[in-house]
Amino acid sequence: MKVFDDPEKQAEFERHLQLAREFIESEQLNAIHFPDIPQEFFSWEPCECCHSKLGGSRYEIKGIGDEGWYLYLVCVECFDALNILQSEGEI
């Protein structure tokens, strides 16, 4: 999926899509619930999707698996990637 004209930005976008796919598989998620009004906040906690240890903006999302609901903190890039994958029907 081409989104950016800049090859570096496109490569970073595709990397986050792949990391999001791996996260979904490793966590055995069937769906993700995104809040109606996402609340972005700063955190030093690593992103639970791409494992970035850089402090930055995070979102809370709920993953739905066979065993129930799970709460995750994800960075902006992973939030967007997961949202795209769900809207494309990959989750």
Image (cartoon, grey):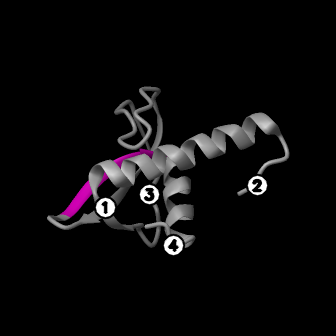
Q: Which residue is mark 3?
A: 39
Tell me the residue that label 4 is attached to: 89
Is label 3 in contact with label 4 (beta carbons under 8 Å)?
no
Residue 51 image point, x, y percent? 40, 33
Considering only order in the chain, which callout, 3 or 1, is on the residue closer to the N terminus?
A: 1
Which residue is outermost to the right? Answer: 5
Magenta stretch in the rendered image: 69-77
> What residue is rendered at 79% in x and 49% in y?
4
Q: Residue at x 37, y 54 (%)?
A: 24
Taking the magenta stretch, the answer to whether it contains residue 73 is yes
Percent x, y for residue 80?
A: 55, 55
At label 1, counting other C-alpha atoms closer than 10 Å, the crowd grade (few under 14, some 14-19, many 20 or more) is: some
Q: Residue at x 57, y 70 (%)?
A: 88
Q: Which residue is mark 1?
A: 29
Is residue 61 found inside the magenta-colored segment of the image? no
- Label 2: element kind: loop
